Image (cartoon, helix red, strand yellow):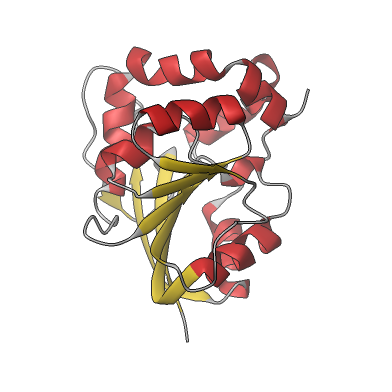
Amino acid sequence: MDSVETFSTYFKEYDRWFEEHPVLFKSELEALDKVVPYNKYGIEIGVGTGRFAKKCVIDWGVDPSENMARIAQQRGIKTLLAKAEAIPFLSNTFDFAVMITTVCFLDNIPKAFQETRRVLKPNGSFIIGMIDKNSPLGQQYQENKKDNPFYRHAHFHSVDEITDYLKDAGFGKFKYWQTLITASEKEVEKPREGYGEGGFVVIKATLLQ
């Protein structure tokens, strides 16, 4: 069972995570809130069940799982079935694009990032929310991923690795925010600038001309 099949099979369990871990979800949202341009036209690539897209007021989403996309549609997100490596939109369509806990499941990161570049307008923003492989939480995910149906197929990356992929795709002007430093379930963490401590890191990159 590959990652798409896994998410299609366990989509209810995936969606339930956000209800079972509301504090962690809120901590991640607060980090995203530092960089998401709420008044612009955007797309989430790997929209899942639309939890992030709805909170971040994102117009469109694409996802390869029909079951996940259906729930995103029920949450009011306009959704198409597609992979990140082949985004079904014209070039220069969106002001910004986001990928949240998606890069670890991509089949081809360079191709996916080039596709993201293609659908962005000049000076568009590419926002990535990711599990940092080098963080304590990332190392914990890596060690236990064989026991997790979702992360069993994941390939975790460091922030530096993803930054290099972004540079190769023509992005720059990087900004970083991190959270889940303690990964507390009791108190929402305020995001900190930079990376290196937080398990969840948000990268904002700008399309260079």
Splitting the image into 4 quarters, where does residue 145 fall?
top right
Identified at 67% across, 46% down, the residue is 106
Q: Is residue 111 above or below residue 192?
A: below
Q: Give the total number of marks visible in the rendering.
A: 0
Front-lying residue, 185 or 170: 170
Identified at 27% across, 23% down, the residue is 23
Front-lying residue, 69 or 176: 69
Q: Position of residue 159 (x, y in %)?
A: 52, 54
Front-lying residue, 21 or 200: 21
Q: Position of residue 87 (x, y in %)?
A: 60, 56
Identified at 30% across, 18% down, the residue is 185
Q: Is residue 93 left or right of residue 149?
A: left
Q: Is residue 90 left or right of residue 39?
A: right
Q: Is residue 132 above or below residue 87?
A: above
Q: Position of residue 193 (x, y in %)?
A: 29, 55
Q: Is residue 96 left or right of residue 111?
A: left
The quadrant of the picture occupied by the N terminus is top right
- Residue 86 visible in the displayed image: yes
Front-lying residue, 190 or 51: 51
Identified at 29% across, 20% down, the residue is 22
- Residue 156 visible in the displayed image: no
Q: Residue furthest bottom?
A: 209
Q: Position of residue 126 (x, y in %)?
A: 44, 62
Splitting the image into 4 quarters, where does residue 104 fall?
top right
